[in-house]
Image (cartoon, rainbow, N blue to C red):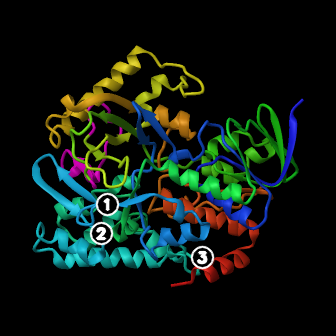
């Protein structure tokens, strides 16, 4: 017989969205429980260790954490900022954009004026275009008040309907400059002709304000949230995969894991929506909104290579390199081109403050789930080891070799400086993060249908709410804002946000 536990709110999934929503509800005096299927809390905040070296799953750098900046204000309200060990990245070039046929490395700097100043020597005829780009990014951000933790909940559809291509071509016809300005679009899986420009603006603006790395990895974000949750007497349970939802009319009475039944007045889902819908009763599974959400397309997944380095061989670099085969690879990324990916990101992480040498390097490139479709029936995690076979390993090795060859452009002796090489595929992300096809950024935003992917935190089931990257916007900031929206729906939007604004100020 299963044991029964009762709470005010049960949060299913402990990704950042689940942690933010849970903490906000716990701060309001709710008896909260968080259920996580894995060994680690945090979803994409998870880290893993190879050869005593920490690697990030998904959080490689964070924007907007400077004094008074947007994410810093959100994290201050949540009381987690004080517990984060951060190191600011190179202000002269957080991201360096590089092309195979070009020896220049184009810097995307921190600070609006500094951003223009650092690119101007490379594009001396484009000063007005650079200033217009910054002004446009700022103007788009103003259209979303909660982005800056300011009052207002509406959306200006005119701004939401403009594609990246439409806006960038209005800023400048210079394709090289466009490619550079969009060079870090891996942050949101841009599709040049389809992605709304507001997604670009909301994503990159924070990094232009300031950019930071988490010392010893992004899992410290999880630890800071868990610490606060326990301060407010929330209970968190690992290895608790929800397998069943029990309905009574238009409400959920309880959810079940293998050992326990969790009863609650309200439930919050931070898991993949396809997985959530699979647990719906027949009555709810066929609702129009469920069918609509099921038609949405996901952004690509990622193939990653994680390199453990020999000690004191490669100096620590406090920036990222975005490498492209050519300019066209920025505009039209080929996630299905598995054997020879046309782009990759080169990044590292400080293992301590003021690192002199890099301890690791990570490489990432787009990769469609379909590329690994022949192994989709496999499942392999630390908790459930099930190797996918030699053919899978050989296939991964071919991609890895190609990426390492590209890496020698920046680190010619890299092969001699390696201790070990490790990889993650879309199947890895699927198995550990829980998204159906390993997507890193959730649903694909479409400028032609901007409202289609704006999903309400409140569902047609009276006591079920949604949080996480698929509800509004992905990324640390986007998911944090979503967590606040979800809490507002549950607590009463006017009451909750009036309280938030009074505490943090409107600016």
Which of the 4 image quadrants contains residue 230? bottom right
Report the disc number at residue 153: 3
Provide the residue designation for mark 1: 89
Which of the 4 image quadrants contains residue 414? top left
Judging depth in this view, the residue of 173 and 263 nearest the camera is 263
Provide the residue designation for mark 2: 110
Q: Which residue is painted at 54% across and 19% down in the image? A: 386
Q: Tell me the magenta residue range.
A: 318-341
Which mark is first along the chain, 3 or 2?
Answer: 2
- Dot 2 lies on which element? loop
Residue 404 horizontal side relative to residue 102, left or right? right
The count of marks equals 3
Which mark is first along the chain, 1 or 2?
Answer: 1
Q: Is residue 120 above or below residue 384?
A: below
Answer whether residue 127 is visible to the viewer in this image.
yes
Q: Which residue is painted at 48% across and 43% down in the image? A: 439
């Amino acid at each position: 017989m299963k044991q029964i536990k009762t709470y005010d709110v049960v949060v299913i999934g402990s990704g950042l969205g689940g942690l933010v929503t849970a903490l906000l509800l716990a701060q309001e005096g709710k008896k909260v429980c968080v259920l996580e299927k894995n060994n680690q809390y945090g979803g994409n905040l998870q880290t893993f260790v190879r050869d005593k070296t920490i690697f990030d799953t998904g959080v490689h750098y964070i924007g907007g954490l400077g004094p008074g900046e947007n994410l810093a204000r959100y994290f201050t309200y949540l009381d987690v900022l004080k517990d984060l060990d951060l190191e600011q990245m190179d202000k002269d070039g957080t991201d360096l954009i590089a092309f195979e046929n070009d020896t220049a490395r184009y810097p995307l700097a921190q600070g609006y004026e500094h951003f223009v100043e650092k690119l101007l020597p490379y594009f001396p005829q484009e000063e007005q275009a650079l200033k217009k780009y910054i002004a446009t990014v700022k103007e788009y951000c103003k259209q979303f008040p909660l982005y800056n933790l300011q009052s207002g909940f509406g959306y200006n559809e005119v701004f939401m309907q403009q594609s990246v291509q439409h806006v960038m071509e209005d800023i400048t016809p210079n394709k090289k400059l466009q490619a550079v300005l969009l060079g870090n679009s891996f942050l949101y899986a841009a599709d040049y002709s389809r992605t709304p420009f507001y997604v670009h603006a909301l994503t990159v603006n924070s990094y232009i304000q300031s950019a930071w790395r988490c010392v010893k990895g992004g899992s410290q974000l999880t630890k800071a949230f868990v610490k606060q949750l326990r301060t407010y007497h929330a209970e968190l349970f690992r290895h608790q995969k929800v397998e069943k939802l029990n309905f009574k009319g238009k409400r959920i009475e309880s959810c079940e894991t293998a050992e326990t039944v969790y009863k609650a007045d309200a439930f919050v889902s931070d898991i993949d929506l396809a997985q959530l819908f699979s647990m719906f009763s027949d009555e709810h599974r066929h609702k129009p909104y469920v069918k609509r959400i099921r038609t949405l397309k996901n952004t690509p997944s990622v193939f990653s290579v994680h390199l453990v380095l020999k000690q004191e061989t490669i100096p620590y670099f406090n920036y990222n390199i975005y490498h492209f085969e050519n300019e066209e690879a920025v505009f039209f990324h080929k996630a299905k081109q598995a054997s020879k990916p046309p782009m990759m990101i080169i990044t590292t992480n400080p293992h301590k403050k003021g690192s002199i040498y890099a301890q690791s390097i990570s490489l990432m490139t787009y990769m469609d789930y379909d590329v690994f479709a022949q192994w989709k029936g496999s499942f392999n995690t630390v908790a459930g080891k099930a190797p996918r076979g030699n053919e899978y390993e050989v296939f991964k090795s071919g991609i890895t070799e190609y990426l390492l060859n590209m890496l020698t452009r920046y680190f010619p002796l890299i092969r001699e400086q390696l201790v070990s090489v490790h990889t993650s595929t879309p199947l890895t992300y699927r198995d550990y993060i829980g998204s159906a096809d390993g997507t890193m950024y959730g649903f694909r935003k479409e400028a032609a249908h901007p409202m289609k992917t704006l999903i309400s935190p409140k569902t047609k089931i009276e006591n079920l709410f949604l949080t996480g990257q698929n509800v509004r916007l992905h990324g640390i900031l986007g998911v944090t804002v979503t967590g606040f929206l979800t809490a507002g729906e549950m607590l009463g939007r006017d009451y909750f946000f009036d309280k938030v604004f009074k505490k943090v100020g409107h600016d």
